Amino acid sequence: MKEVITTDKAPAAIGPYSQAIVVGNLIYTSGVIPINPETGGLPSGTDVQARQVFSNLKNLIEASGSSMDKIIKTTVFIRDMDKFAEINEIYEEFFEAPYPARSCVEVARLPKDVLIEIEAVAEK
């Protein structure tokens, strides 16, 4: 059986999908974008958007009954691979070793023209 997770501490779904789904002991998040859930605003700049997206992910994972240290795998979508090192530095602010497995992909465009989006799988 799957459990739908919603929280107002992360951006609401902007389409027909759930913020996160729990199946058994695993949490699957949808792509999280760097919209400020309190204001609905989008910060500018890769560094600020990255910190916002990881904060949103943290809030969603915690609302799912878990924590950042239980994330198993992340997929990071970025608009500019030249920002890879900068995003890695911010990633380390939110994760500690042993780090989750990760993919990072440069994409042409993301929802609402954000610069970064992340999805994750975590243990509950």
Image (tube, grey):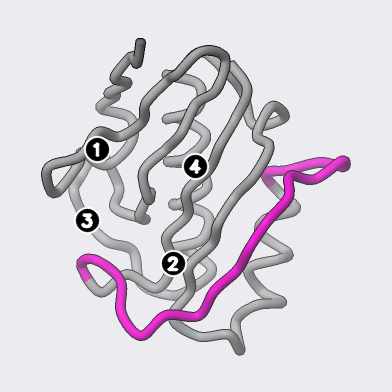
Report, in whole angstroms, how far the alpha carbon at label 4 lies from the one at label 3: 14 Å
Task: Determine whether 120 is above or below 110 in the image.
Answer: above
Q: Secondary structure at mark 3?
A: loop
Task: Kindly identify which residue carries mark 3.
Answer: 41
At label 4, the amino acid type is Ser
Name the foreground residue: 120 vs 7.
120
Provide residue 60's location: percent of width, then percent of height.
Answer: 42, 30
Tell me what residue is drawn at x 18 percent, y 48 percent. 40
At label 2, the amino acid type is Ile
Task: Kindly identify which residue carries mark 4.
Answer: 55
Considering only order in the chain, which callout, 3 or 4, is on the residue closer to the N terminus? Answer: 3
Mark sitting on residue 38: 1
Indicate the quadrant where residue 97 lies: top right
Mark sitting on residue 13: none
Considering only order in the chain, which callout, 4 or 2, is on the residue closer to the N terminus? Answer: 4
Tell me what residue is drawn at x 63 percent, y 63 percent. 103
